[in-house]
Image (cartoon, grey):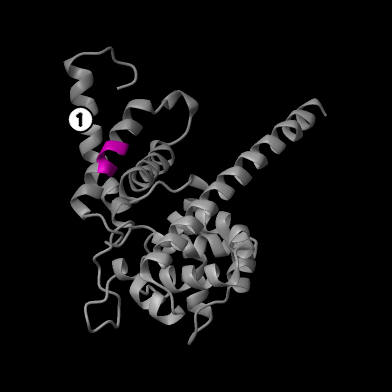
Amino acid sequence: MAGLPDGPERSRIRQDIVCAWLPMADRLAGRFRNRGESMEDLRQVAALGLVKAVDRYDPGRGNAFESYAVPTVVGEVKRHFRDHLWTLHVPRRVQDLRNRVRFARQDLSQTIPGRPPTRAEIAAHAGMTEEEVRVGLEALDSFSALSLDAELSGAEDGYTLRDTLGSADPALDVLVDREAVKPGLRRLPEREQRILYMRFFRDMTQSSIAECLGISQMHVSRLISRCCERLREEALRDGSADETAEGPAKAAAGRS
C-alpha cells in the first residue's frame, strides 16, 4: 500500500488491511471494558486508532506493523477516556498517577490477601512517593461527579449531597457595620447602651423599654434616634479618618 499512489487500488488495499486487523483492535478495546464506556463505543475508538496506524505506518523503518499499531490503538482509547469521560478536567499528571495506583493495587491485592494495601506499600511497589499515591487514590474516586440530588449512602430520610452544603450567612452583610459602631457604643452612657441592647438585641418594643426604665415611650424614641444618628456620624467620621491616614502610608510605601 505504501508504494502505491492515491487511487482505487490503494484504497482497496487499505480497507483490506483495516478489516484484517480489526480483531486485534477489538481485543485491545476489551482491555478497557467496565470503565464507564460501552464496548461498542470502545470498539469504534479502537478502530479509529487502527485506521490512523495504517495511514501513518512507515514500513521503511523496518519495524513490524503490530509493534506500531498496538500502542497507537491503545493511545487512542486512552485519549478518548481522558478527553471525553472525565466529568471535570483533570490534569494529565493526575490521570497518570491514578492509573499507576490502580495497577499497583491490582498487583498487590494478589499478594496481600485479606486487606487492602497501605499507601506505603503502593508507593514502594509503584516507585512513587506517598503524596503521589494520595493524589492517585483521590483521583480513583473522581472519575465522575455525583448529582447534588444523589441520596447519601445509608441515609433513610432522603438526605442528599445538597443538604450538606452551607449557605451564605446573612449576618455577614452587617459585619462591617457592627464592627464600625462598636467603639461608639462603648462611649455611650450606660442607660443609652441598655436601651439599644433591649431594642436591637432583645427585640423589645419601645413601650416595653419605657415601662422597664420608667420613662415615656416618646423619650425612648428620641434617645434611640439620637444614639443611632451619633453612632452613624462617628462611624463615618472614623472611616474617613482611616482612609486619610492610609493615603500617606500608601504613598510612603510606594516611594520605598
Label 1 crowd (10 A; few <14 / some 14-19 / many >=20)? few
Q: In the image, is residue 249 above or below residue 106?
A: above
Q: In the image, is residue 180 above or below residue 7?
A: below
| Along the line of sight, the residue nearer the viewer: 112 or 235 | 235
- Magenta-span inclusion, residue 47: yes
Q: Position of residue 209 (x, y in %)?
A: 40, 75
| Along the line of sight, the residue nearer the viewer: 75 or 208 | 208
From this viewpoint, is residue 205 visible?
A: no
From this viewpoint, is residue 217 visible?
A: yes
Tell me which residue sits at (48%, 71%) in the image.
195
Q: Position of residue 86 (x, y in %)?
A: 35, 51
Which residue is tagged 1?
A: 15
Q: Position of residue 212 (x, y in %)?
A: 42, 81
In this view, the residue farthest toward the bottom is 114
Tell me which residue sits at (47%, 52%) in the image.
95
The residue range painted magenta reads 45-49
| Along the line of sight, the residue nearer the viewer: 128 or 224 | 224
Q: In the image, is residue 34 above or below residue 108?
A: above
Task: Name the quadrant containing residue 59.
Answer: top left
| Along the line of sight, the residue nearer the viewer: 33 or 219 | 219
Looking at the rendered structure, the kind of residue marked 1 is Gln
In this view, the residue farthest toward the right is 256
Query: How many labels sit on residues?
Result: 1
